[in-house]
Amino acid sequence: MKVLKIFQLALKYLYRYRRRYLFLAAALIFGFGIVTFITALKDGMAENVYNSAQSHYAGDIVITGDDQSSLQRAYINSAGVETILSAIEETALNPTEMVLRTHSGNKGVVFFNGEAVRLKYVIGVDWENEARFFKKLNYSFPPINDLEGDDSIILSMPVAEELGTRIGDSLILETETRTGQKNTGVFIVRAIVEDTSIFGYYKAYVSRLTLNRLLRFGDNDCSAVGLFFSDRSRVDEKKIILQNALEDKLQMGPLVSNRDELEQENNLSWSGIKYMILTIPVYLSEVSELLNAMDILTYFLYIMMLMIIFVSAMVTYRLILHERMKEVGTMRAIGFYEVDIRFLLTMETVFLGVISLAAGFILARIIIYFSGFLSFSWFPSFEIFMKEGRLSARYMPRTIFTNIIAVFCILFPAVWFPSYRASRSPLPNMLSGGMK
């Protein structure tokens, strides 16, 4: 019953001295709002980068083949494809989705109406198997019908603008075969994608079967096998399982952790096709450096906000306790123990913290909403950090919980020391309004 009474008194006193708490509440709201804004925005940017790379490289785990004897080095023959698919089935990796793609690198050129544009990426896909992927793309001009056919091509907006082409136009795609000859095909523009990021600026999608024939691949060959998983936390574990399953069957390169290690491995010499198992962090190791720089800024602001909260809390409680000494003395006189008084003041802090942090979270949401309208066109390739052209946040429960714990870890010492000193003052001093 005493605990319930203390809860009621804490709420009552918090309301009574609400004006005294305004400064501390403002510090809590602003501090928690800024910290939440930064951490959520950073997590959102990291998520958007990962999703962009996942779509581009086609999977959380990507198995690639590299044939140094071919001008189209990204190559997995049909026997290698069968071996990889069998190993995936045998190891029971259970991917939610599996795709095969063919890449022609930066040797593709599209021609239309006297204009030519060199493509950085020409990607051969299976329209039906990747229908879900193409439904999620952000189109400037979406496909009129379902994507199908061996003569369909999807262009990125920058390519379409340079060529002056529209949906329904016919254009010529020139590629280089495995042995160095030029080969061309006629395609019809079925859709145009709004993608100006480093992954999609000069990019085109065509049928994998058609691209295989242009490159002089076999119909069942490809350049990469991509695996998607619903649980990303186990991706590293699964790539090791797959690596062990394939080592005795194919010429496997080592597992690498970043792009530098990957480039070092690619600069070695070998005969035949060497296979590598890669994950998205390997491709994004350079981008991660920018996100790590954001971490430094986050930690700096984190510490600064916590210091502001701590100082605000110390000042607020010293003033409040000085004003409330007679009240505290009266409570002692009618039977409240020192621990009861400290518990009462602590509960006031808890209630104040809960209300202020809730308001701070709302403030963070408001800031993030309006930050989505900011333009970052001056920042080259910043689009990979954005979702549909806008900044977005990711509110991870673990991060939010960590922020809350950090704030309360600052608040409790700030209230405990003044309350401990006040509660142990001699009763006559309390009743006279003084404090030793």
Image (cartoon, rainbow, N blue to C red):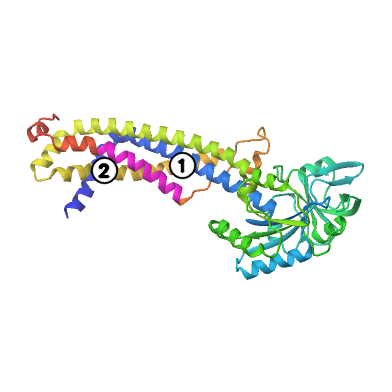
322 left or right, relative to 101: left
Give how far across and how far down residue 344 sits, in percent.
21, 44
Q: Residue at x 61, y 44 (%)?
A: 285
The amino acid sitting under disc 1 is Thr
Q: Which dot marks residue 36?
A: 1
The stretch in magenta equals 398-415
Q: Residue at x 60, y 38 (%)?
A: 373
Quadrant in which the C terminus appears: top left
Taking the image as drawn, is residue 253 in sight?
yes
Give how far across and how far down residue 21 sits, in percent.
30, 35
Nearest-to-viewer mark from 2 and 1:
1
Residue indicated by mark 2:
348
Q: Residue at x 37, y 42 (%)?
A: 406
Name the foreground residue: 134 vs 240.
240
**Local crowd size for mark 2, using a 10 Å CA cut-off: few (<14), some (14–19), many (≥20):** many
Disc 2 to disc 1, C-alpha distance: 23 Å
410 left or right, relative to 335: right
Quadrant in which the N terminus appears: bottom left
The amino acid sitting under disc 2 is Glu
Name the foreground residue: 376 vs 52.
52
Give how far across and how far down residue 98 sits, in percent.
67, 63
Name the foreground residue: 119 vs 72.
72
N-terminal of the two: label 2 or label 1? Answer: 1
Give how far across and how far down residue 181 sits, in percent.
91, 51
- Dividing the picture into quarters, in which one does residue 435 lie? top left
The secondary element bearing badge 2 is classed as helix
Taking the image as drawn, is residue 59 in sight?
no
